[in-house]
Image (spheres, rainbow, N blue to C red):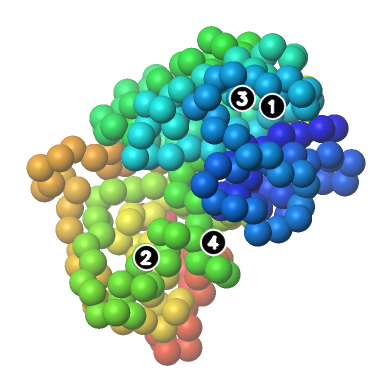
Amino acid sequence: MRVLVTGGAGLLGRRLAADAPAGVELHRTWRHTPPTDGAGTWHRVDLADRDATRALVGGLEPDVVVHTAYATPAGTRDIVAASTHVAEAASTVGAGLVHLSSDVVFDGEHAPYAEGGHAVPISPYGRHKAEAESRVATACAGAAVVRTSLVTWAEPLDPRSAWVADSLRAGQAITLFTDEVRCPVRLDDLAAQVWEVVGLEDRGGPWHLAGSEALSRHELGVLIAEHLGLDPAGITAARSHDQAVPRPRDLRLTTGRADAALRTPCRSVRTLFPPSAASGRSITTSSS
């Protein structure tokens, strides 16, 4: 099977390459971040360039495209247009498509959200992701749309977790919300489930691949701090509800389709961040 992974130098793209099943001929794209490993064959392309994207996909003729690439500063260009071009190119060569999306396509007021839930985004990033989902579904019949949550890893820390750790080490106060709830997912579990979706014949439609436990942003920050032996007192608790700019607050996802069809379970991210001896706390499994 020939598989093209867009965003191959990103967090998920790198893990997908590391965990590629035997028999996969892997190809990966990059634009700004130069490749740092030799897994698969690299291709530099700007996916917002329709002609360049079609030329790449048309030349490779992959069996499946896994579209993980995105960038938030120019979402119309690098999320909506790029996703549309990838879907169009995949459809043209008859390739399957697994499109990575996000829980932020929901408004956060009607959780938990099932796979068939109607997208009602309230943030710019959410609106870009929701529009990309719609365009992908139109351009590539049978595309799988994978909605996930906060992709989390401990060694090395994912960028969001690293920001928490670096801020605390530098003595910089940070604020995290107690009422903004997500289902953070372990990077390794997400990659394994994505590969399982790639291998299915009946993969089309929405999938929710998310962690087994809902945690607030504040709870996750405290977990990270205590795992690293840092003082979580540097994390100020606040409420998203009190902020001037609305944010989706409760984005819990149900994962019924994945639970029924996939072998790999998504564990709680607590398993990534056991407290250090200095924290004096034990691991708990209670949900927030």
Instruction: Tell me if label 1 and label 3 are in contact, CB under 8 Å.
Output: yes
Q: Amino acid at mark 2?
A: Trp
From mark 1 to mark 4, how far is it between C-alphas? 31 Å
Task: Tell me the quadrant of the picture where the C terminus can be found.
Answer: bottom left
Q: Nearer the viewer, residue 267 or 233?
A: 233
Instruction: Give the x, y percent position of residue 260.
Output: 67, 33
Q: Nearer the viewer, residue 47 or 3?
A: 47
Residue 277 seen:
yes
Q: Is residue 111 left or right of residue 208?
A: left
Label 3: element kind: helix
> Which quarter of the figure has residue 86?
top right
Q: Identify which residue is drawn at 19% across, 48% down.
A: 240
In three-dimensional space, the C-alpha distance between marks 3 and 2, rounded to whole angstroms, equals 33 Å
From the top left corner, tell me how far across and down residue 234 is, in percent: 24, 76
Q: Amino acid at mark 1?
A: Leu
Q: Label 3 is placed on what type of residue?
A: Thr
Q: Which residue is mark 1?
A: 56
**Is tag 4's residue or tag 2's residue first in the polypeptide sequence?**
4
Q: Nearer the viewer, mark 3 or mark 4?
A: 3
- Image x and y of residue 206, in percent: 55, 24
The 10 Å Cα crowd at callout 4, few under 14, some 14 to 19, many 20 or more, is many
Q: Please tell me how crowded label 1 is: few (under 14), some (14-19), or many (20+) other residues with Cα within 10 Å.
A: some
Residue that badge 4 annotates: 153
- Name the residue carrying label 2: 163
Residue 143, quarter of picture: top right
Q: Which mark is residue 73?
A: none
**C-alpha span from label 1 to label 3:** 5 Å
Q: Are marks 1 and 4 in contact (CB under 8 Å)?
A: no
Disc sitting over residue 53 in the figure:
3
Quick check: marks 3 and 2 in contact, CB under 8 Å?
no
Q: If you read the primary sequence from the N terminus, does the residue marked by circle 3 or circle 2 appear first?
A: 3
CA separation, marks 3 and 4?
Answer: 30 Å
